Image (cartoon, grey):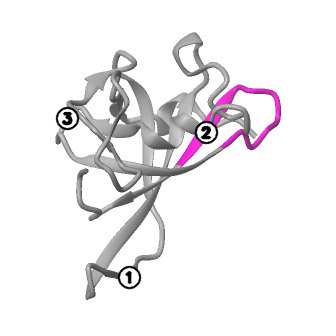
Amino acid sequence: MAVGAGALRERVRFDRRPAVEDDGFGNTIGPWEPATSSMAARIRPLPGREEVLAQRLGGVQPYEITVRASKALRGLSRAAEPAATEWRAVNVRTLETYDITDIRNPDERGEDLVFLVRKGVADG
């Protein structure tokens, strides 16, 4: 079911690292660049949890970011596009960044895309 336009109250953009560099441990490094222009979105918090990060217990806040599908996001809901989870989402208003963990196409028609993201993860 498509999300109503009134629920899309935030503005987000998606960033990626254009040059894939490896830090020697399999992690991508380099500066972030915008992959899309800003677009209307709904950012909805999900129940939080604690994770062990660098041998320390820390809070990680998961969110769902829902956006209308667009040409800039074409193909991101397909399994053939694993690089999309290496992108990040940025709330344009607050400049908060979110680590993308999964992408869903809930209506299977490509009208909306739902990004499962985490806030509170170190920005690599």
* Residue indicated by mark 1: 51
Q: CA distance from mark 3 to mark 1?
A: 27 Å
Q: Which mark is residue 114?
A: none
Which label sits on residue 93? 3
Q: Which residues are magenta?
A: 104-115
Label 3: few (<14), some (14–19) or many (≥20) C-alpha neighbours in 10 Å = few
Q: Is residue 49 magenta?
A: no
Q: Nearer the viewer, mark 2 or mark 3?
A: 2
Position of residue 72 measured from the top left corner of the image (x, y, whole percent): 52, 14
Count all numbered tags in the image, as a single digit: 3
- 106 within the magenta span: yes
Instruction: Give, as a three-letter code, the residue at label 3.
Output: Arg
Label 2 to label 3: alpha-carbon separation:
27 Å
Residue type at the position of mark 2: Pro
Q: Which mark is residue 82?
A: 2
Question: Which element type, helix, strand or loop, lies under badge 3?
Answer: loop
Quadrant of the image occupied by residue 21 = top left
Q: Quadrant of the N terminus?
A: top right
